[in-house]
């Protein structure tokens, strides 16, 4: 399955569960594709952390695509602190 097809089912306001720890094991290609689609917004993200300022889920935060972030660790993202 191509990444475009994988994100085609993601709608604004959805909850997304994202695996990984830090930047290890995260679906980085899918996160990047979501970040390039500004119509996918108002998301609730559940993950261990949000990555860094410019990598991982931090890309979605920088684009204001995340409404709520649920995580157990702030990580290295200065914006999320």
Image (cartoon, helix red, strand yellow):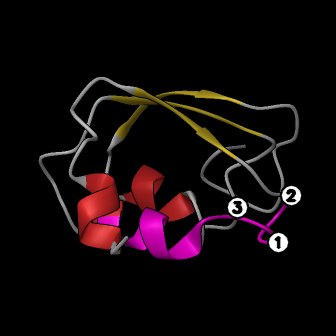
Q: Is residue 1 above or below residue 72?
A: below
Residue 4 position within the rendered picture, expressed as x and y whole percent measured from the top left = 24, 69
25 w.r.t. 40: above or below:
below
Q: Which residue is mark 2?
A: 21
Tell which residue pokes out farthest to the left in this image.
Answer: 39
Split into 4 quadrants, where in the image is the N terminus? bottom left
Mark positioned earlier in the residue sequence (3 or 1): 1
Q: Secondary structure at mark 1?
A: loop
Task: Depth check: give the residue in front, 68 or 8.
Answer: 8
| Residue at x-position 34% and y-position 58% | 6
Please tell me whether mark 2 sits on a helix, a strand or a loop: loop
Residue 75, numbered label? none
Is the Cβ of the residue at disc 1 closer than 8 Å to that at disc 2? Answer: yes
Q: Is residue 46 visible?
A: yes
Q: Residues under labels 1 and 2: Cα distance?
A: 5 Å
Assess whether mark 2 and mark 3 are in contact (beta carbons under 8 angstroms): no
Specify the segment rendered in magenta: 21-33
Q: Circle 3 sits on which residue?
A: 51
Label 2: few (<14), some (14–19) or many (≥20) C-alpha neighbours in 10 Å: some
Q: Which mark is residue 24?
A: 1
Query: Could you tell me residue 31's position as x and y percent?
Result: 46, 63
Q: CA distance from mark 3 to mark 1?
A: 9 Å
Element assignment for label 3 = loop
Pointer 1: residues within 10 angstroms few (<14), some, or many (20+)? few
Q: Is residue 35 left or right of residue 22?
A: left
């Amino acid at each position: 399955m191509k990444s475009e097809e994988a994100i085609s089912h993601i709608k604004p306001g959805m909850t997304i569960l994202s695996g990984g720890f830090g930047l290890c094991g995260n679906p980085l290609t899918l996160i990047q594709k979501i970040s390039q689609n500004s119509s996918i917004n108002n998301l609730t993200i559940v993950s261990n952390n949000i990555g860094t300022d410019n990598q991982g889920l931090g890309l979605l935060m920088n684009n204001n695509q995340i409404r709520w972030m649920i995580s157990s660790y702030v990580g290295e993202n200065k914006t999320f602190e």
